Image (cartoon, rainbow, N blue to C red):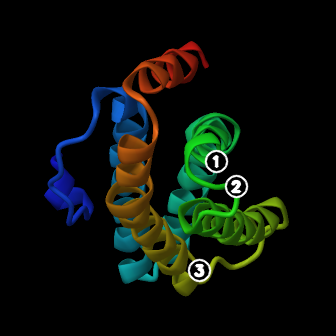
């Protein structure tokens, strides 16, 4: 599945050091598409299955991705731009909002509760908006602010995790 099918509107050339994160974004867009499909069906069994699959993706992949950005990418950008740069602040706010939505989803999964289609659709849309933001705002800020050598050191740290 290509970026367009998964919901990306960006067709940008990315510095190779950021490829691991862009690859993660592709996987997250596929997950968002799955949430949308389940949400459109409004079948409780399908909603439960999609919610459980996404919760697994959160635990196995997306949490790690957020942590890498928060512990590696954002501190590096802060060194070369500013600790209170809009890209850093906005990324952290978006991560927090998405984590809250996923927390709500996990609570519903822990207690056999009805999963609202709107919750899955809201998570999918928040995730897509966030990825578009990172690909069009955060990553270009990193590419233009951080020296080449530091980009490759960042890539090594991303690849080690």
Q: Could you tell me if residue 145 is visible in this image?
A: yes
Q: Give the x, y percent position of residue 83.
A: 70, 55
The tag on residue 78 is 1
Specify whether 99 is left or right of 155. Answer: right
The residue identified by callout 2 is 83
- Asked if the residue at tag 2 contacts the one at tag 1, i.e. Cβ–Cβ closer than 8 Å, the answer is yes
Local secondary structure at mark 2: loop
The residue identified by callout 3 is 119
- Asked if the residue at tag 3 contacts the one at tag 2, i.e. Cβ–Cβ closer than 8 Å, the answer is no
Q: CA distance from mark 1 to mark 2?
A: 4 Å
Q: Give the x, y percent position of residue 137.
A: 39, 62
Which of these two is toward me, 55 or 41?
Answer: 55
Specify whether 78 is left or right of 27. Answer: right
Specify whether 68 is left or right of 33. Answer: right
**For mark 3, does the 10 Å Cα neighbourhood hold few (<14), some (14 to 19), or many (20 or more) residues?**
some
**For mark 1, does the 10 Å Cα neighbourhood hold few (<14), some (14 to 19), or many (20 or more) residues?**
some
**For mark 2, does the 10 Å Cα neighbourhood hold few (<14), some (14 to 19), or many (20 or more) residues?**
some
Local secondary structure at mark 3: helix
Q: Give the x, y percent position of residue 159.
A: 50, 17
């Amino acid at each position: 599945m290509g970026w367009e099918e998964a919901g990306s509107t960006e067709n940008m050339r990315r510095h190779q050091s950021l490829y691991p994160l862009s690859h993660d974004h592709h996987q997250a867009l596929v997950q968002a598409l799955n949430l949308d499909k389940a949400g459109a069906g409004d079948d409780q069994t399908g909603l439960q299955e999609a919610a459980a699959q996404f919760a697994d993706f959160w635990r196995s992949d997306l949490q790690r991705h957020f942590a890498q950005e928060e512990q590696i990418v954002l501190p590096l950008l802060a060194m070369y731009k500013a600790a209170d740069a809009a890209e850093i602040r906005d990324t952290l706010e978006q991560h927090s909002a998405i984590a809250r939505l996923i927390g709500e989803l996990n609570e519903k999964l822990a207690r056999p509760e009805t999963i609202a289609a709107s919750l899955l659709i809201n998570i999918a849309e928040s995730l897509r908006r966030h990825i578009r933001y990172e690909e069009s705002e955060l990553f270009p800020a990193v590419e233009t602010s951080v020296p080449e050598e530091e980009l490759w050191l960042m890539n090594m740290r991303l690849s080690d995790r």
